[in-house]
Amino acid sequence: MPSAQNLVDKFNDLKTLPHVAIKLTQMVGSETSTMQDFEQVIKLDPVLVVRLLRLVNSPYFGLSSQVESIAKAVVFIGMKHLRSLVAVEALRNLFKEKTDGEVFSRKNLWIHSATVAILGQMITRRIFGQDGEDVFLAGIIHDIGLIVEDQLAGDDLRKVCAEYLVNGHEDSITGIEDSLIGTNHAKVGRLLATEWHLPETVIEAIRFHHRYDKEFPLPSVIGILQLAEFMACKMNYGVVSGRCDPLPAYLNGHVKSKMADYKVLLKALPEEMAKAKELYDAEPEK
Amino acid sequence: MDKLINDVFAELADGDEDLRDLHGVLEEILPEASLALYGDNGAVVGASLPGLSAAMLDECRGRATETEICGSFRLAGAGWLHAIRLQDYKAVLVFTQEELTEDLAGNRHLAALYHNSIRLALLRCLHQEAIIENKQLSRRMEVVSSKHAQLLDDNHRQFLLIQEKEKEYAKKLESEIASQTKQLRDTNARLEAASRLKSEFLANMSHELRTPMNAIIGFSGLLLETPLTGEQKEFAETISKASSSLLVLINDILDLAKIEAGKLELDLHPFKVEGLVKSVEAMFRSQALAKENRLSYQFDPDLNASLIGDENRLRQILVNLVGNAMKFTSKGEVVIKASKAKEEEKTVSLLFAVSDTGIGIPADRQKAVFEKFTQADGSTTRKYGGTGLGLSITSQLVSLMDGRIELVSAPGMGSTFSFVISFAKAAGKEEGAPPVVHGAVMPVRADYGSDKALTNEQPSTSGADFKVLVVEDNLVNQRLATLLLKKAGYEVDVADDGLKGLLMLKEQRYDLVLMDVQMPNMDGHTATRKVRELEASAQKDEYASLAGRAAPLCIVGLTAHARKEDEQQCYDAGMNDFLTKPIIKDKLVSLIDRIRFPKI
């Protein structure tokens, strides 16, 4: 059975993730990179430029003036945010490939990831009054390991999903992956995120997002990610439709104490999702 | 979707929370009343009220209208029980109050009071939600504003970074430009040096060329004066013509080299423009006849004042222009014009123009004709001959005189070359004012012939009483000079170098010395200085050629260099005049005539 590293190596050989996304992620971490540097890298992919500008100008950002260049986008929304959008665009294509199945489809996984990202950012902003940029990135990217598994062990992954759905036992999906595939999407995702030099908090969130036995004090990226994941699944935007893992016990108290807050948040959700349609639409209009 | 959203926290949520909240608010507003909320799901919030029948409750639940009083019921004891349907809460509110002892339906004001109190309670609950929404909004605003601040910081940092990068770039650019400028300067200096070397080389080459030219021109001329067959005469004439034009070419090249090396200096003398123009016209008269051209000159009559300028170079310019016009015109007309363009107190500007009715020059070639080795059309080179140096030299000479040559021409319509040059007016109007070379007074030639033995009133071609000593090391030149002089009727002796020359001056009496400059043992300058020293000393009488002379012995330098400094060196050494080699017969004879008959 392959190790997580085996899968990641093979996956990298396929060069599925655009070079641009990786390069940009490194640049965000650098103190000396300028918006021009950013623009020059993104310009290498003209399609990406068009899509990014569409996203930046979408209602999600609600900017008052039209942004018509990447450099200006950096000025208006910041490099970090733009990096997340590049991740969105890069992954959108990844999630599109391969035919859909019943228990598992990349399309569903994409909508799941986008929903978790948007919910996570809403929670961070509305409940904790923080930016939530890392939560958004973690949401978009947390299940990248599933794509790797689908690419390299698609049949096994489908077996995992079926088992997870039918069995209904206490095991989380990662446990079933470990036994059927030999590794799980949290491990694989963590390795990839490390290679891509994503922020530590994002790597941690990917690594632990299926660990329900640990407690992650709020507002941590992982804590909010788990909460958002639970909420998305309850709204039928789970990875495998038909089963949701329960909310990790440590989050119960928080949700109960802020129930009124969450009700207000949930009330605002449909509108926010509509605004973010450009983000999670699997097939953006040409 | 809405249902799903509402049920997200169904497991966690306390289903009766809303009812409890409402109950709390109602108790606050109506502290006197006993209240109970009966949820549709069976939950009861508040102390259950005695006397409420299940049938009453069901009846009230059946009413779907919002906040409607659905009934008041008289209780067994005193008092009434009132029930109100709360559709939003899916519950029925039942309450009683001790003081309230009548049917609400019968007392409108009381009913309105209760109605409003309950509405207030409901609004308060909604208000709670609005407060939370407001709180979330303000958190989001905080996020936006902190993000805004961060973006400002980021953008400022970016601005500084970019500024720094731009500065670096500018610095790099500057140093690059500096190094390139230096490179260009160095290259330029190298090129200038190379050009100077080339010009010097050319000047030296012309010198080397002149020596053999001397022999060719001289001897072909002499050959023509011997009895020859028709064919021989024709050959000799061809040699003579060809070598003459070769000499012109060499002079042109030398001029150009001098101009480019910046070594050409103007030789300013008083002269008269009219004489100059006339002499140029005269020069081309025969050529005009041969080509059936009408040659004429137009001259402002008030231009007869004496001006100061380089007459020879001005002549060269006009000769070049007229020669050029002649070359490209046949059966047409060539006109030389000189007119006053502007006159001031001390200067006068003259406009010179040479027009022809020849083939003309197309507009796109008009600039090129002033470039070296270029003619208007490559094909004309073959047809009309020439090196293409003439106009280049002409235009540079005009520039040297602070003028600018202009050309008006069209193919088939002829050409007009014109230029304006400003001259200083000569101080005295008298002719023969002493010539001035760069402020230095030239040796006075009028003294040459004050030798009593030579003071003949009449010019004479016979020179039997005139003895010439040729001091020259080159055998060919010795022979040429001897032959030329003998032909002219003079007695000639030859000395191989300056030393021998001095000895011969001691032995015999000579009237003229032709002194080569470059010679072994003693060169011409040294020999001349020696003569001038002897003339000033007591030894003077020991020399046959010097004794008893009122004026110094006439010494004429022979030099292959036609450069100004060579000329000056000859004068500095004490020579009276000089001739450039190759020796041209006419020039030699006229020089000797001038020496013998200075008044003419």
Image (tube, coloured by chain):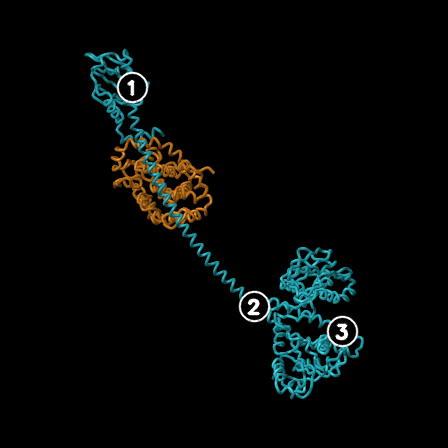
User: Callout 1: helix, strand or loop?
Assistant: helix
Closest to the observer, A121 or A108 = A121
Tag 2, which secondary structure?
helix
Q: Amino acid at mark 1?
A: Asn
Q: Position of residue A49 (x, y in %)?
A: 45, 43
Q: Residue B557 at what x, y percent from top left?
A: 65, 78
Query: Quick one: label 2 or label 3, which is nearer the N terminus?
Result: 2
Nearest to N terminus: mark 1 or mark 3? 1
Q: Tag 3: Cα neighbours inside 10 Å, few (<14), some, or many (≥20)? A: some
Q: Nearer the viewer, mark 1 or mark 3?
A: 3
Image colour assigned to chain B: cyan
Q: Give neighbour class at mark 1: few <14, some 14-19, many 20+ (Cα, 10 Å).
A: few
Q: CA distance from mark 2 to mark 1?
A: 111 Å
Which residue is identified by label 2?
B194
Q: Residue furthest left?
A: B77
The C terminus of chain B lies in which quarter of the figure?
A: bottom right
Give me the chain letter of mark 3.
B
Residue ID for mark 3: B237
Q: Considering only order in the chain, which callout, 1 or 2, is on the residue closer to the N terminus?
A: 1
Residue B556 visible? The answer is yes
Q: Are marks 2 and 1 on the same chain?
A: yes
The colour chain A appears in is: orange
Q: Tell me the distance, in whole angstroms, between the alpha carbons under discs 2 and 3.
A: 40 Å
Circles 2 and 1, Cβ within 8 Å, touching? The answer is: no
Disc number placed over residue B404 in the picture, else none: none
- Chain to which the residue tagged by mark 1 belongs: B
Write down the residue under mark 1.
Answer: B116
Give percent across and percent down for residue A271.
38, 32
Q: Amino acid at mark 3?
A: Glu
Q: Nearer the viewer, residue B295 or B421?
A: B421
Residue B593's place in the image compared with A197, above or below, is below
